[in-house]
Amino acid sequence: MSYGEIKCLSQYAFLFYFYVFFFSPSVILLDSKAQQTELEWISSPPSGWEEISGLDENYTPIRTYQVCQVMEPNQNNWLRTNWIEKGDAQRIFVELKFTLRDCNSLPGVVGTCKETFNLYYQETDSEVGRNIRESQYVKIDTIAADESFTQGDLGERKMKLNTEVRIIGPLSRRGFYLAFQDVGACIALVSVKVYYKKCWSIIENLATFPDTVTGSEFSSLVEVEGMCVSDAEEEADNSPKMHCSAEGEWLVPIGKCICKPGFHQKGDACEPCGRGFYKASSQDLQCSRCPARSYNDREGSWRCDCEDGYYRALSDPPSAACTRPPSAPQNLVFNINQTTVTLEWTPPADTGGRSDVTYRVVCRRCTWDPEECVQCGSNAVYAPQQAGLTDTYVTISELLPHANYTFEVEAVNGVSDLSRTQRLFAAVSIATSQAAPSQVSEVIKEWVQQRSVQLSWQEPEQPNGVITEYEIKYYEKDQKDRIYSTVKSKSTSATVNNLKPSTAYVFQIRAFTAAGYGTYGPRLEVTTKEEATGTISREGGLVLVFYLVINGVVKFPGTKTYIDPETYEDPNRAVHQFAKELDASCIKIERVIGAGEFGEVCSGRLKLPGKRDTAVAIKTLKVGYTEKQRRDFLCEASIMGQFDHPNVVHLEGVVTRGKPVMIVIEYMENGSLDAFLRKHDGQFTVIQLVGMLRGIAAGMRYLSDMGYVHRDLAARNILVNSNLVCKVSDFGLSRVIDDDPEAVYTTTGGKIPVRWTATEAIQYRKFTSASDVWSYGIVMWEVMSYGERPYWDMSNQDVIKAIEEGYRLPAPMDCPPGLHQLMLDCWQKDRNERPKFDQIVGILDKMIRNPNTLKTPVGTCTRPISPLLDQSTPDFTTFRSVGDWLEAIKMERYKDSFTAAGYSSLESVARMSIEDVMSLGITLVGHQKKIMSSIQTMRAQMLHLHGTGVQV
Ligand code: AMP
């Protein structure tokens, strides 16, 4: 590189001229002054140059050569130095110090006296002997004195020392001689110094640059590669270089070395990082303290090790804190729609210190008995995906119908796979229902009349099971579907009757399979024909009124599935999943209305912001509860909160974040059904009673569609509101039954309300919707007998025995035979023979539409196929008196009436008819019924025991 290039660099690239000036010592090859002994240079002729000892200006002794042949013409005196080995030098500096006498000051020397001398050199590889061959010398220069000296006025000499420097080179041989030619001057050669220049070894930018001899030309620079100091390395593509100038100066450092990982720069060296510090990259300037959750206990570390239980992902830089796998996702909730499950959750409480949390879902299909789970396989479809989920939800579809699945949602981060600790996940167990049938899309109007329409349709493209029924929903177009009716059909056609003439109706059809209803197909509008004479059917009107009054809102079950809150590890989570947390300030408790197992039941008002205040029942948890009691108490809310049906008691919300803990339920003005009926004994029409039963059946249909088995369906667990709408209530798991005073321990273990419970549930705890149907039959009996106790005061053991032997409750008084038949159907021993709630609703609807079928003359109730007989106690024949018997059936108030009318023996009582009972002045229909049904049982018992026929 030349100076010109460097200048260019400086202007163009570096923007400043980086010029480093270092001290620039020379390497001396010859210094005549430094030698104290004789120089012994060669002088030719010997009479010419003469070696003389003297003192320099500092009075230091020196060796000099002098010549002063100024008087003689044609002088040619040579003086040659000893051989000078040049070493590395290419460019040699020759510094001469001399004095020269001014010829003018010498008298009589004109023509011979000179004032210059010549300097020569000869290159050789070795010494060449003592002869001087002039021709072999190369002239360097003619040297003149800048200042010659003269004789002073006082006669003393005034010495004027001249210094001249000449440069020779480039030299190529190993050494050289210098020669001084005098041609007649008066010279004293005070000192001869021969040297070359060198750039001395330095450390610059952590690189060592060795001693470097300058270039041969004045304008040349010697490029020198630097060597990194120990524990340093060259910066990538930037190796260290410097330039040694002709003047022995280091110029233009380029590139550099940097301390290796684990070392940092201190001055011109790299030192190891201390303990607890690290330096990951040579590019980093400083050592840094170990990041969080990491440590090291040795010097010179490029990284720190993670503490136990903490990790660094492969992609984590050493500067990253050590992290750990996240905790489990929180608040995992799911939504199931047939065979599609949507899971949602909230991020884990502890992300492990990382921001790369994603989620993955593990799906297992399980059988519970024996409990075995297998991976879900490739059939399940995950959207958006199964793993690497960044959002907190996933939908899993195409699951098998009617299967139990467990889903585990795990939060993972960059170090999850490194950790050997146990996986943390949130899990839910879900049972799928079967896919419901697809839409019935093509509906054809076969014919239309004034009051009827016949429709036909195609089976849906995907029945997803055996279609057992179609439901045709229809409503007057003007009414929208606020009020609608339905008819059912087992085939793909149906005639809808009882329509109004000249009225536009809208029809929609949906199919039903074991998996539930499909969605309604498109609307078909049909206008009935004009009627010539035209009055509106009474029955049609009645149906509509029934739907309005009895059911309030008409709503059909969906296919939502009930989730057992016990599947939640954290019961609190279950509560908040299904129940709204209410602010206690929105609730006003007014009075105590009952006592529950966990505390008082109160009535009060709920005023939610922006809503009208409503009457509510408030169940409270008494103070001093245990954690288990709190959990069991709230369990009811977790269950109730999942339901939304006009015949299922509606949960308003819970208060769990304050005291007392409360469950807030819609207020049911008339309290529980059994007490309500007893209070209004005999006061309702059969239609009203059937309306109540219809409501209960609809509620149960909804619950069974959701897969919820009640286990404790009884009139005492039905609540009645001011519109006589009956709603199923009292939800819970085992605790409801524990809580039920009717529940008793059975030999199979566990408490069971024997009188309401199906045989298989008593015998081997097989609780299903079919066992709920049995209980429903008992509720029917309770309703139709205005709250009579099923099996009266028979012992539980006797009830179990009687049922086992095939005996069933007789029809209550005034009970339409169709209804009693329905009860008996509910009490079929084979649970598969029992009707489903859906069918029960259908049958009751039919009865309501055709009130004639419900007409039963008083006292002509059909006898049960197998009248219930009690073979042990209470044995009517063992009652000593009519009084005993009346006491047993809690009708002792009529003792006197019986005695007054002459009924003194049980035999005479057994012959009584309803008219006889009425003639005693017993006017309350419920009491009449109670007495009559007891008399009927008494008769049956007598018949059974004595074979005596009793005439009615
Ligand atoms: P439970 O704890 O459900 O057995 O309730 C005890 C009593 O409180 C019941 O027998 C009812 O009389 C009364 N009760 C419970 N819930 C309600 C409600 N939602 N509306 C009116 N009364 C209720």
Image (cartoon, rainbow, N blue to C red):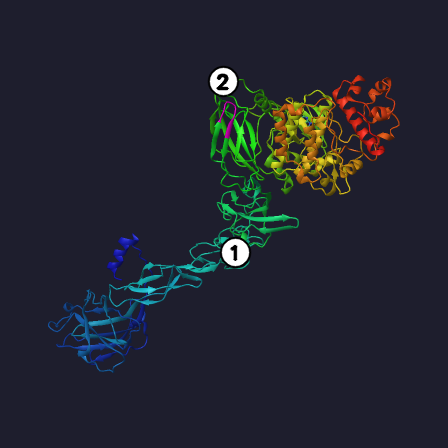
Q: Is residue 366 left or right of residue 21?
A: right
- In the rendered image, residue 238, in percent from the top left (x then y), is placed at 35, 59
Quadrant location, the C terminus: top right
Where residue 168 sits in the image (x, y, percent)? 23, 70
- Give the labeled residue for mark 2: 532
- Label 2 vs 1, first from the N-terminus: 1
Residue 193 placement (x, y as % from top left): 28, 70
Q: Position of residue 448 (x, y in %)?
A: 48, 26
Tell me the amino acid under the disc marked 1.
Cys
Residue furthest left in the image: 111
Quarter, ligand 1: top right
Question: Left of 836 or right of it: where is 170?
Answer: left
* Alpha-carbon span between mark 2 and mark 1: 98 Å
Q: Quadrant of residue 704?
A: top right
Residue neighbourhood size for the residue with mark 1, other residues' Cα within 10 Å, grouped as few (<14), some (14–19), many (≥20):
many
Q: Is residue 873 left or right of residue 757?
A: right
Q: Give the number of marks.
A: 2
Report the mark closest to the observer, 2 or 1.
2
Q: Is residue 451 highlighted in magenta?
A: yes
Indicate whether 305 appears above or below 161: above
Label ID, residue 304: 1
